[in-house]
Amino acid sequence: MLKLNNISFSAVDGGKSSDIIRGIDLEIPDNKFVVITGPNGGGKSTLAKIIAGIVQPTGGRLIFNDTDITDMSITERAKAGIGFAFQQPVRFKGLTVLDLLRISAGKNLSVSDACSYLSEVGLCAKDYIKREVNASLSGGELKRIEIATVMARDVKLAVFDEPEAGIDLWSFNNLIRIFENMRKSDKNRTVVVISHQERLLKIADEIIVLADGKLVRRGPADEVLPEIMHSNYAQTICPKIEE
Ligand SMILES: Nc1ncnc2c1ncn2[C@@H]1O[C@H](COP(=O)(O)OP(=O)(O)OP(=O)(O)O)[C@@H](O)[C@H]1O
């Protein structure tokens, strides 16, 4: 279980301090598929980065499986079983997809295991395994490769920041299928997805709504989704719901 105890984050920008995350208390139980949503600028990515250790909170503590991870680095958190997939995946010139999967797994993953991770994310492994992780990969391909690296890491808690960002509709449909499969098959991993997408919100065990740096609602998808649809920020956070 991941516990956030009174987590806050303030940043100084242009000499002015602003409170971006304001005293969030939250428990994310094991083996659940949780979607964090809310209006733009509400603090979702910041919270995801705080969980992954990319951003250090200015207040509060994070407890993961009874261990205080607040002061742990990204690497230490990765070792503790927390994986993070960026909104904009990073390209690594000179590194092949196989190298990247091996580095992520932290072991000399066999080619066949690497291929099965790529297949899981809908990539034809033989076409990609030797490819360089550079600008020649499309945004959708890069997203899928990054998801495969998180899977290869065998993490206990996987955090995905807006996996749908910047990909076309066709890739989006495939991506949703990956998460639907993850939701069905992944019973030993907690998956936290930051998303505005109705199709991801629908498959969540739990939806958490963040607005203005505060937790404003949490609950099962069938309870929270209809409320989001009828709230005054529905058009901002869930444009597809209105279609
Ligand atoms: N280091 C920082 N310094 C100053 N402002 C910051 C910093 N990090 C985040 N912010 C601001 O905090 C707010 C929350 O940002 P964040 O990226 O967490 O929002 P979000 O809910 O993920 O938004 P979106 O849905 O648009 O991705 C934004 O207004 C952002 O500009």
Image (cartoon, rainbow, N blue to C red):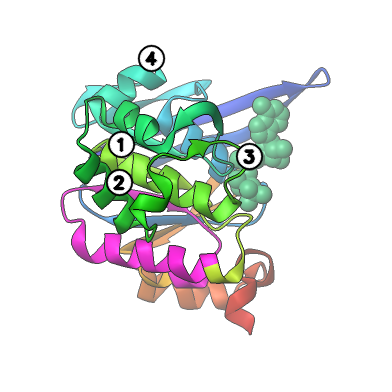
The amino acid at mark 2 is: Ile
Of label 2 and label 3, which has the lower sequence position?
A: 2
Return the residue nearer the eye: 157 or 64: 157
**Mark 1 Cα-neighbour bin, 10 Å: few <14, some 14–19, many ≥20:** many
Quickly name the residue at label 4: 71
Residue 221, percent from left and from top: 37, 70
The circle drawn on residue 28 is 2
Dividing the picture into quarters, in which one does residue 152 lie?
A: top left
Q: CA distance from mark 2 to mark 4?
A: 19 Å
Which quarter of the frame holds ligand 1? Answer: top right
**Mark 3 Cα-neighbour bin, 10 Å: few <14, some 14–19, many ≥20:** few
Which residues lie in the magenta part?
A: 171-200
Residue 213 lies left or right of residue 54; in this view the side is right
Of label 4 and label 3, which has the lower sequence position?
A: 4
Dividing the picture into quarters, in which one does residue 4 lie?
A: top left
- Is there a contact, CB below 8 Å, between mark 1 and mark 2? yes
Does 176 lie within the magenta span? yes
